[in-house]
Image (spheres, rainbow, N blue to C red):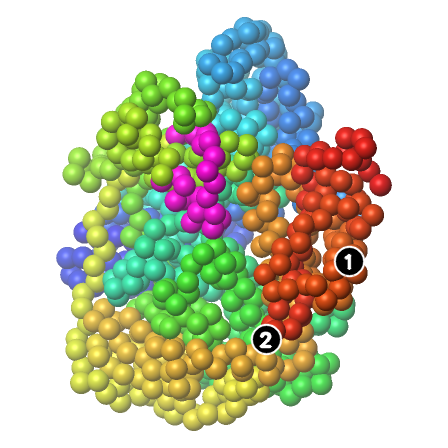
């Protein structure tokens, strides 16, 4: 079997061809073509096949990860969309939720209003009404009115129509009829119907998701059709599959119907590739760090399992998209990230990027800003004479030095110090992102391996691992192609969902049994339609539950077998465990089932590379040269004689002592002084970082002052944001979860703000007074382990329902500061309800 994986990034398009019969892997990389993404895909596939000596007609599978849908949303270049909805609900997607995105902005920007997915004049209503709890029809659909509305949208020139009726997830009959009428009256438009795209309750999130599906639908459909036709003209005979945000592949037909599921297609493949590489090397717990030219994607897989985001957290750009989405953080930290001094005089790196064009200064394509790639070149980790892509791209050191010198002079540093400082700041941002995505959610980093992926991942991985006390770094055989490899390790997947709200104590077992059976049959029909062999079909069952009164559900796998009382009891235990794993706490409270799901999986053949020839442990055969490279020692640049190795000459069992650099076609791996790497049986580089872990924190305290300020400030802000996030998600108070009516922060020993969450400004204005009032009242009677509860309006709270919790922070026996949070609960006392002072 011959399979191709194609991953399109912001800077490069990565390709891999695995020929299982010949036991050969071929990789290639070319610049992306943002103006026409399909061109890079088609040209890359042609070049890859030519390089491998394979005809495209011989290829059995072509799997693709794409950022096309994402870029449409981020650049506001979607279709002209019309919407047909229930009378009285025209402005649901305009009003949205009470929570606002920019709480501290004087302009109070609301992006979904200033850049609406559907202009108000194109949001038309019809008379109809379906009601809860069982989908009863209260008002019949006025079909003549529907025809008038569709004709009006056609005259208005809309390219796509979104059909979103109230409670259609319970009874879709009206939406089905509207779909038929739209196809009769406006057959050329793209059609997005809510019960087909997202049959779930919560009308705002459903309406927004379906509108987003219509917004990206026409361009995604054309993109897929264009490269599908071009590849078929070259002889490709099988179906193309595309990566979905949930971590499974979709057929072209499914992706065209629900392109909204492709919105995080690009980053997911890197995590799956990291899981595959880790499992191959014997590691189940992995953190993936996939650094490209523009951004870094960070994901965590405990036990080799993907972690999903909560459906209310799945935003793309400015818009809510309530779709299954793997929990991946993407930050603006890549090889092209620009180093600069902001208006406040703070040294920063990213998120602005030089991108593919003009690219870093050293590319010689007109870029003048210093970037992370320029810094790596100036420190000697990248070689001008070797360049990138095996010498296909030359690097100009003089241009990199000129760009970095401008920054260094403003900072009062040498060029080497500025370059090292830029990488330290960028490293810190990635470290914080990994902590937020993993460590601070209950995972112990010492139990994980860090998988370095992307063209720049292996350049940073060891330094980041030491900061996080991760003992091992895994650099796969083709780190720059990990995302493309991940596509070949991904199963075909479809998800089916239904809203079923039951209190577990009084759940209707007969109804639940029947509904799960319906979803299971849908899943099985889909796999049969896709031509998946019976022995490779799998159906998983899942549920979304919460404690009664909460607003956020937790998604988890449910037991197999018969849906009966024992099954229900086991479901409850699984939910308790899932909630505790997510938030570190479980309640002895009633559980509410909200949604049920099935996932249809078409398992692909396991991807197993050949084992590498075993050597004698001495990597001398791969040594290419020795030269000076600058490393971080105590926060200062230190020149060390460093050996450079050619990766394709390394054999299994070879042992490399740092400092060392390993070069290959798609990336460069940095092994800092004191660390040791070994090549495993599959050609992975496994780097033991334990020797560097113990001193990492001490070294970090010796950073140059502008860098230290950025690092400490970022850490405190991340802590404050995490405090607010946990409070928001676990809340029983509707005003907290609907409007984020809360504040959280870190304060010094005198009660002054060090860092705060970007929550309601009113609370953050009050929190310093609250903390200072606690200090005034308690004086020296503040001890380690105290938890102080406070709702006195005269002591800082704006009214009595605002309750604050203040916890003192001690270090080596001395009071060094406070952590505090305040939020609006239910009315709990005072002379009047909601007493305001």
Question: Residue 157 location in percent, x, y?
Answer: 62, 26
* Residue 487 screen position, x and y as percent: 33, 52
**How packed is label 1: few (under 14 Cα within 10 Å), some, or many (20 or more)?**
few
Q: Residues within 10 Å of mark 2 (few under 14, many from 20)?
A: few
Q: CA distance from mark 1 to mark 2?
A: 24 Å
Q: Quadrant of residue 597?
A: top left
Q: Is residue 434 visible?
A: yes
User: Which residue extends farthest front?
Assistant: 781
Whether residue 246 is visible to the viewer of this picture, yes or no, is: no
Left or right relative to 289: residue 320: right
Q: Position of residue 825 (x, y in %)?
A: 67, 38
Per the image, label 2 sits on a secondary structure element best described as loop
Q: Please give the name of the residue rendered at 27% of the width and 83% of the height, measured from the top-left corner.
A: 655
Quadrant housing residue 523: top left
Where does the C terminus fall, quadrant-wise?
top right
Foreground residue, 820 or 422?
A: 820
Q: Is residue 407 magenta?
A: no
Q: Report the front residue among 562 and 205.
A: 562
Residue beneath the point at 39% across and 30% down = 596
Tell me where residue 782 appears, x and y as whole percent.
68, 63
**What residue lies at 47% left-to-right and 61% top-to-bottom?**
439
First in sequence: mark 1 vs mark 2: 1
Q: Secondary structure at mark 1?
A: helix
Q: Which residues are magenta?
A: 574-596
Q: Nearer the viewer, residue 518 or 64?
A: 518
Q: Is residue 588 magenta?
A: yes
| The label number, if any, that marks residue 256 in the structure image | none
Residue 777's disc is 1
Instruction: Give the residue number, with chain letter if any, for mark 2.
Output: 812
């Amino acid at each position: 079997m011959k399979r191709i994986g194609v991953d399109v990034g912001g800077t490069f398009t990565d390709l891999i061809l695995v020929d299982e019969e010949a036991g050969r892997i071929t990789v290639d990389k070319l610049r992306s073509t943002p103006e026409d993404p399909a061109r890079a895909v088609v040209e890359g596939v042609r070049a890859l096949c030519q390089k491998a000596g394979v005809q495209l007609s011989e290829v059995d599978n072509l799997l693709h990860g794409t950022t096309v849908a994402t870029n449409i949303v981020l650049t506001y270049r979607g279709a002209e969309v019309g919407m047909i909805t229930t009378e009285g609900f025209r402005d649901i997607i305009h009003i949205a939720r009470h929570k606002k995105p920019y709480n501290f902005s004087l302009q109070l920007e609301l992006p979904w209003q200033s850049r609406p997915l559907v202009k108000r004049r194109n949001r038309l209503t019809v008379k109809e009404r379906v009601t809860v709890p069982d989908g009863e029809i209260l008002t019949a659909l006025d079909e003549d009115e529907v025809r008038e509305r569709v004709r009006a949208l056609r005259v208005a020139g809309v390219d796509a129509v979104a059909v979103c009726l109230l409670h259609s997830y319970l009874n879709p009959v009206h939406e089905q009829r509207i779909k038929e009428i739209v196809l009769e009256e406006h057959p050329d438009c793209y059609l997005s119907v809510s019960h087909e795209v997202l049959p779930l309750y919560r009308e705002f999130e459903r309406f927004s998701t379906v509108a987003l599906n219509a917004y990206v639908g026409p361009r995604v459909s054309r993109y897929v059709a264009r490269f599908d036709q071009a590849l078929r003209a070259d002889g490709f005979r099988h179906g193309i599959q595309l990566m979905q945000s949930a971590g499974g592949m979709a057929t072209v037909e499914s992706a065209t119907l629900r392109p909204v599921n492709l919105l995080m297609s690009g980053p997911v493949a890197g995590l799956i590739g990291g899981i595959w590489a880790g499992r191959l090397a014997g590691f189940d717990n992995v953190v993936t760090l996939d650094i490209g030219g523009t951004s870094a994607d960070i994901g965590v897989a405990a036990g080799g399992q993907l972690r999903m985001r909560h459906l209310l957290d799945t935003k793309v750009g400015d818009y809510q998209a309530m779709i299954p989405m793997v929990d991946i953080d993407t930050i603006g930290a890549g090889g092209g990230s620009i180093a600069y001094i902001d208006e406040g005089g703070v040294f920063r790196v990213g998120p602005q990027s030089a991108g593919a064009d003009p690219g870093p200064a050293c590319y010689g394509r007109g870029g003048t800003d210093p970037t992370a790639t320029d810094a790596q070149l100036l420190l000697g980790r990248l070689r001008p004479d070797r360049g990138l892509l095996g010498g296909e791209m030359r690097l100009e050191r003089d241009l990199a030095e000129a760009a970095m010198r401008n920054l260094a002079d403003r900072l009062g540093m040498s060029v080497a110090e500025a370059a090292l400082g830029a990488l330290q700041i960028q490293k810190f941002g990635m470290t914080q992102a990994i902590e937020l995505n993993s460590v601070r959610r209950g995972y112990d980093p010492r139990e994980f391996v860090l998988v370095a992926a992307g063209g720049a991942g292996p350049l940073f991985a060891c330094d980041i691992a030491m900061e996080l006390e991760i003992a091992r770094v895994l650099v796969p055989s083709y780190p720059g192609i990990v995302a493309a490899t991940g596509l070949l390790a991904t199963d075909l997947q479809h998800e089916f969902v239904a809203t079923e709200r039951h209190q577990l104590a009084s759940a209707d077992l007969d109804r639940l049994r029947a509904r799960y059976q319906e979803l299971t049959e849908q899943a099985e029909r889909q796999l049969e339609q896709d031509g998946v062999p019976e022995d490779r079909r799998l159906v998983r069952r899942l549920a979304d539950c919460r404690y009664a009164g909460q607003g956020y559900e937790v998604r988890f796998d449910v037991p197999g077998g018969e849906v009966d009382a024992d099954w229900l009891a086991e479901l409850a235990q699984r939910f308790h465990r899932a909630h505790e794993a997510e938030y570190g706490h479980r309640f002895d409270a009633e559980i509410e089932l909200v949604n049920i799901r099935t996932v249809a999986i078409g398992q692909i053949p396991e991807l197993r590379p050949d084992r590498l020839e075993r050597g004698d442990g001495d990597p001398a055969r791969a040594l290419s040269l020795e030269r000076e490279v600058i490393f971080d020692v105590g926060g200062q640049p230190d020149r060390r004689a460093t050996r450079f190795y050619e990766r394709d000459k390394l054999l299994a069992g070879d042992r490399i002592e740092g400092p060392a650099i390993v070069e290959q076609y798609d990336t460069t791996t940095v092994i800092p002084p004191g660390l040791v790497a070994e090549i495993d049986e599959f050609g992975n580089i496994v780097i033991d970082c334990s020797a560097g872990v113990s001193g990492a924190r001490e070294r970090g305290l010796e950073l140059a002052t502008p860098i230290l300020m950025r690092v400490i400030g970022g850490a405190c802000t991340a802590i404050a944001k995490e405090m607010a996030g946990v409070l928001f998600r676990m809340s029983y108070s509707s005003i907290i979860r609907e409007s984020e009516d809360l504040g959280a922060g870190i304060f010094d020993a005198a009660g002054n703000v060090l860092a705060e969450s970007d929550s309601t400004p009113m609370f953050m204005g009050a929190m310093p007074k609250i903390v200072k009032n606690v200090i005034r009242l308690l004086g020296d009677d503040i001890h380690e382990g105290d938890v102080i509860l406070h709702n006195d309006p005269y002591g800082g709270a704006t009214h009595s329902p605002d309750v604050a919790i203040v916890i003192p922070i001690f270090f080596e026996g001395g009071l060094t500061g406070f952590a505090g949070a305040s939020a609006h609960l239910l009315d709990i006392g005072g002379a009047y309800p909601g007493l305001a002072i």
